[in-house]
Structure formats: structure tokens, C-alpha cells
Image (tube, rainbow, N blue to C red):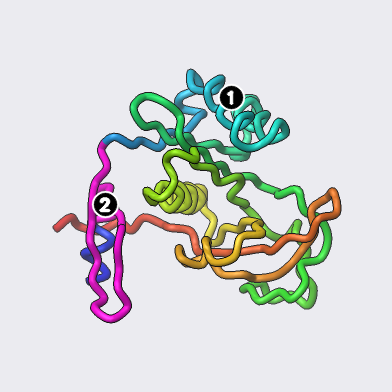
Amino acid sequence: MAAAIRLYERFGFFVYSETDKEFCRSYIVDYGVQILSLREHPEWADECREFLLEHFNEFTSLHPAEVLASAEPFPQGYLMLKDNRVIGWTGLLEKEAVTGRVYGWEGTLAKEEVVSEDLSPWITPLLVHPDERGNLYGKMLLEHARKEAGRLGFKLVYLTTGEIGYYEKYGFREVGLTTFTWGRPTKVYGHDTIIKEVQNEL
């Protein structure tokens, strides 16, 4: 069952319903949606910037330009297209804008004290257009970011959030608490990356 699920996911299928009692999964393919790397498609930079400025904030709207200006592995930016317009965005950063100790650490690092600088990479931000929410596009973006982090050689990925219940649905778990550089506390969540297996196709 697990092998079949992985195979379906490699061909673009994703889970859209699941019941605890029946353990059944249903799959659909949305051929109208694409997730692209901004580095590979820089022609979308202006629309990504406008999307982030309208639906997130001015600081984050600088992210596309930072992605294209860097020759290093980070930052990375990924846009979601539907009907030839940007409806979603996520990225990978080497460091998040948090500082200091991660309190209540329950992750995998075997250290007496974990600080935010020990953790990398970070998924940030996750954004889906308000009119397109409820279609599991956030899940698709999260999985794409985990695959990209795995492709870059990482085993774990992190994010910060004040949301309760959303990221847990997709396998993330709270691993500690820290503070943004401007003073606001935030939760830290972690998840395994997705590393593609080399196997024979069925």
C-alpha cells in the first residue's frame, strides 16, 4: 500500500480525503495547477511580488527579488499557477527571522540547548490566494517544499507558525518555541523532507 501511494504521488496524485476507520485514500489530478521554481521561471517575478504585497506584507514581497539575486542554494521561491495567474507561493530559507534558544525542544537534535541557528532550512511563507483556499493547494505547496529540501540534501525542514491544527494535518509537529527578531513569540514545527527513492516503475 505504501509503495503504491508513493508511486501515485510521484505522478502528481495527492490525497484529498481519508477516513480513520476505513483507511481509504482517494486521488485526483489537477492538471490546471503548476508549481514552478522562480529561479527557473524569472519571468513571473513581478507578478509574485505583487501577489505577496497584496496578500502578505511589504517585507515578504521582497522575497522574489532576493531569490533571483542569489547564486547560493538559498533562498528558493516556488509559485503556484492556475489559469496562467499566480495563486500561491512558498519558499525555502536557510535561516528564519527568529533568534535565540528554542524552548521546550522535542526534536531530533541531540543537544543540551538548541538555538534557532542550528535549524535549517525553513519553509516560509506559505500563501494561497483567499479565493483558492479549501482546495488543498497549501498541502501541495508544503509537499513541494519538502521535496525540494530533500533534493538539496536535507533530512528535516522547519517552519514557524501561530496556527493551531493546520500543519499537524500534514504531518508537521511542534518541536519548540522561540522568538522572532522583533520580539513576538512563535511556535517551531518540523517535518521530514521527502527524498525521492530510486526504484523500478511498476
Residue lying at the far left of the rendered structure? 202
Is 192 one of the magenta-colored residues?
Answer: no
Q: Position of residue 31 (x, y in %)?
A: 25, 38
Residue 151 visible (yes or no) = no
Q: CA distance from mark 1 to mark 2?
A: 30 Å
Q: Position of residue 200 (x, y in %)?
A: 19, 57
Q: Secondary structure at mark 1?
A: helix
Residue 13 tag number: 2
Q: Secondary structure at mark 2?
A: loop
Left or right relative to 68: residue 79: left
Is 27 one of the magenta-colored residues?
Answer: yes
Looking at the picture, which amino acid does disc 1 mark?
Answer: Glu
| Residue closer to the observer: 177 or 191 | 177
For marks 1 and 2, the one nearer the N-term is: 2
| Residue closer to the observer: 10 or 137 | 137
**Quadrant of the rendered image containing residue 36:** top left
Quadrant in which the C terminus appears = bottom left
Q: Residue at x 70, y 49 (%)?
A: 95
Residue lying at the far bottom of the rendered structure? 21
Question: According to the image, label 1 marks what residue?
Answer: 50
Residue lying at the far front of the rendered structure? 131
Q: What's the magenta region?
A: 8-31
Q: Residue at x 61, y 60 (%)?
A: 163
Relative vertical location of residue 175 with respect to residue 100 in this rendering, above or below: below
Q: Residue at x 60, y 45 (%)?
A: 125
